[in-house]
Image: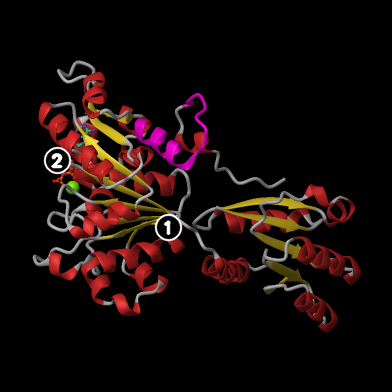
Amino acid sequence: MKNIIVVTRNEELKQTIKKVCEVRMPKMNLSSISQDVYLENINAIPLEADIFLVESSSDGHSTELVLRKLAEIYPLTPIILLVTNQSQILLLQAIRAGVREVVNLPLVGKDLNEALDRVNKKISLNEFKNGKILSFLSCKGGSGVTFLSANTAYGLAELANKNTLLIDLNLQFGDAALYISDQKPTTTLADVCMEINRLDSDLLESSLIRVTPNCGVLAASTRINLDQEVNPEQIEIILELAKKNYEFILIDLGRQLTSTSLRALDKADIIFPILQQTLPYLRDGKQLIDMFLSFGYPKEKIEIIINRQKNDATVTLKDLEKTLAHEISHKMPNNFEVVNNSINLGVSPLEASKNSNLSKSLIEFVRHLTGIPVVPSKGIIRRLFNFSPILE
Ligand SMILES: Nc1ncnc2c1ncn2[C@@H]1O[C@H](COP(=O)(O)OP(=O)(O)OP(=O)(O)O)[C@@H](O)[C@H]1O
Ligand SMILES: [Mg+2]
């Protein structure tokens, strides 16, 4: 979410800007200060401004002062100037202060929206996101890799407002996109690999299924000879590019370990092996964890998730931790009805069954990943994540 600071004394103008920003996707967080406060006390401005909207006052002198001070203190933050008449002197001052856009007053919503779009585009081009790569995998089919990776991607985007990419690297049985959307992919991972020499941010972005403004999926191909079409070097290039453009990159690795999926594991910041409480999972899980340690992955890079957790299972969590010699980091409850409903409809339980135990665990998981501290639950997702725009 972008933080916009409006510098004006005009209450009516603030309300008009608020209305424009409220309907934008992703949402924009608004706060405002009056020019007087700003000039008297620089500390009145919150530091995390992404964009300034400055109304030019009737006396050009104070506008020039505001612009100069902002440019001096926040040289990298774009300024949009709102003007009643574009006098040459004012425009010259604006250019010197590095103003990116000038929008005429009285304000027309469309003009402000277009200016914000242009500024946003420039910001995201300049931003180096250094996204986190999270790899989800299993040693057995049907453990819940796709359900958990797809819904975590959805949760990061919708609850924590993180720009998120889900890559379906389950080359034989890829179906991640269908878990959170009803769209059929027109471009897939294999197509992106074929264009790897001219791959850039725009091409990657245009190859995604856009589930929500913040959540994109790079779907797996349905073609058969994918091992020949997707190789480790290509995956590395895609992940390096994705790290610059998305805050979180989640990978559904399925259950097969290939040279390509091993490269994705190498590049991962965190690996999430997904296990269930049965003996076969215990045996194969042990092999998987030992293999990761033999690769030299640090223990902290591996966070085990127990899916379909049951208190009365024969294999207890203690048994698992002892045999695996590794802590269980996360637990997802067993809720067949909610999961199957969600998969059949292609709608996340975070949307369709907000109050289910599974949604609550997914919320906790998103909190853990984003570092947002856990507060006593009030049961309402958006309130927990504190998203409401502010404008005094
Ligand atoms: N928390 C859960 N509670 C109840 N059932 C679940 C849960 N998670 C997954 N399932 C069941 O397991 C099935 C498989 O889930 P999912 O497709 O995510 O597994 P997968 O590991 O991706 O499988 P594959 O190896 O085939 O790709 C689901 O269709 C659902 O029936
Ligand atoms: Mg799967």
Circle 2 residue = 142
Q: Is residue 336 left or right of residue 24?
A: left
- Binning the other alpha carbons within 10 Å of mark 2 as few (below 14), some (14 to 19) or many (20 upward) gives some
| Depth order, front residue of 77/56 | 77
Q: Is residue 204 visible?
A: yes
Rendering coords of residue 329 (x, y %): 34, 31
Q: Amino acid at mark 1?
A: Pro
Give the magenta range. 361-378
The residue lying at 66 percent from left, 58 percent from top is 17
Query: Would residue 334 be visible to someone looking at this image?
Result: no
Q: Is 374 one of the magenta-colored residues? A: yes
Mark 1 burial class by Cα count in 10 Å: few <14, some 14-19, many 20+? some
Q: Is residue 289 magenta?
A: no
Helix, strand or loop status at disc 1: loop
Of the residues shown, which amino acid type is indicated by label 2?
Answer: Gly
221 to the left or right of 38? left
User: Is ligand 1 closer than 8 angstroms to the Cβ of mark 2?
Assistant: yes
Q: Quadrant of residue 10?
A: bottom right
Name which of mark 1 and mark 2 comes first in the sequence. Answer: 2
